[in-house]
C-alpha cells in the first residue's frame, strides 16, 4: 500500500467521522434523557405525588441500620418498619422515602436511627387510592436528582470528547 492510498483512506475515515459528529451528539443527548427518565424521574414524581397524599399517625415497630459499601468505604442505610391504620385496617410498611440516599456516614445514620427508634410516633403519608403505598419522609430531594443529572451529562460529555477531541490534527505536513 502506497502513502497516497493510506492518505486517501485516512481522509475517508475523517470525512465519515465528521459526518457522524452531530448524529453521535444527538444520540448521547437521547441516552442521557432516557437514563434520567428511567432511573430518577419515576421516584422523584412519586415523591412529588406524596404532597397530595393523606396523613395518618403511625408507630415504628423496628429500626436499624443496614451496611452499604460504597467502593471500599462503609456507609449506612436506615431500615424502619412502621405500622399505621387507615379506615380501621392496619398496614405495615418499610418505605422511608422514595428517593433513596445511597448511604449515610455513621453519625448521621445513628441520628436518623434514633429519630425512628422503636415505639416512636411518626406521620405516615399514604396514597388514598392504595393505602399500602406509603412513606414517612415525603421531602423532595433536589440535590439527588440534580447530582444525577449532572453526572449523566458529564459522562456523555466525556464520551463525546473522547471521540471528538477539541483540537484538529495538523494536516499541513502532508503533501500530494
Image (spheres, grey):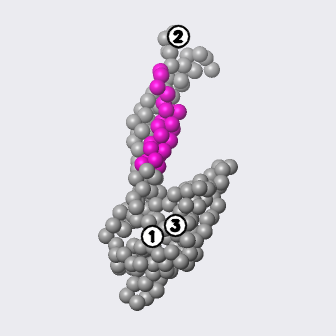
Q: Is residue 55 left or right of residue 71?
A: left
**Mark-to-mark CA distance, 1 and 3:** 12 Å
Q: Nearer the viewer, residue 148 or 35?
A: 148
Q: Which residues are magenta?
A: 146-168
The 10 Å Cα crowd at callout 1, few under 14, some 14 to 19, many 20 or more, is many
State the predominant SS element of the stretch in magenta: helix
Which residue reaches farthest left?
52
Q: Which residue is mark 2?
A: 173
First along the sequence among labels 2 and 3: 3
Q: Dot 1 lies on which element? A: loop
- Disc 2 + disc 3, Cβ < 8 Å: no
Q: Position of residue 139 (x, y in %)?
A: 40, 61
The 10 Å Cα crowd at callout 3, few under 14, some 14 to 19, many 20 or more, is few
Q: What residue lies at 40% left-to-right and 53% top-to-bottom?
A: 142
Residue 45 quadrant: bottom left
Q: Which residue is mark 3?
A: 115
Q: Nearer the viewer, residue 175 or 149?
A: 149
Q: What residue lies at 41% left-to-right and 78% top-to-bottom?
A: 57
Q: Position of residue 96 (x, y in %)?
A: 49, 68
First along the sequence among labels 1 and 2: 1
**Mark-to-mark CA distance, 1 and 2:** 68 Å
Q: Position of residue 153 (x, y in %)?
A: 45, 42
Give the number of the mark in front: 1 or 3.
Answer: 3
First along the sequence among labels 1 and 3: 3
Q: Dot 3 lies on which element? A: helix
Residue 48 visible in the shown view: yes
Vertically, is 44 above or below 95?
Answer: above
Residue 84 quadrant: bottom left
Q: Which residue is mark 1?
A: 136
Q: Dot 2 lies on which element? A: loop
Q: Nearer the viewer, residue 17 or 133?
A: 133
Which residue reaches farthest right?
72
Amino acid at each position: 500500500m502506497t502513502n497516497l492510498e493510506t492518505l486517501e483512506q485516512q481522509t475517508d475515515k475523517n470525512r465519515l467521522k465528521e459526518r457522524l459528529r452531530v448524529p453521535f451528539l444527538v444520540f448521547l443527548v437521547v441516552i442521557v434523557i432516557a437514563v434520567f427518565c428511567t432511573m430518577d424521574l419515576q421516584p422523584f414524581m412519586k415523591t412529588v405525588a406524596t404532597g397530595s397524599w393523606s396523613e395518618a399517625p403511625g408507630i415504628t415497630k423496628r429500626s436499624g441500620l443496614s451496611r452499604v459499601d460504597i467502593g471500599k468505604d462503609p456507609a449506612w442505610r436506615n431500615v424502619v418498619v412502621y405500622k399505621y391504620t387507615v379506615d380501621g385496617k392496619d398496614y405495615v410498611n418499610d418505605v422511608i422515602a422514595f428517593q433513596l440516599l445511597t448511604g449515610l456516614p455513621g453519625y448521621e445514620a445513628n441520628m436518623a436511627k434514633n429519630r425512628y427508634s422503636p415505639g416512636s410516633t411518626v406521620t405516615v403519608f399514604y396514597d388514598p387510592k392504595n393505602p399500602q403505598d406509603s412513606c414517612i419522609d415525603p421531602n423532595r430531594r433536589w440535590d439527588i436528582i440534580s447530582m444525577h443529572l449532572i453526572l449523566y451529562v458529564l459522562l456523555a460529555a466525556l464520551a463525546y470528547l473522547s471521540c471528538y477531541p477539541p483540537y484538529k490534527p495538523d494536516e499541513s505536513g502532508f503533501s500530494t
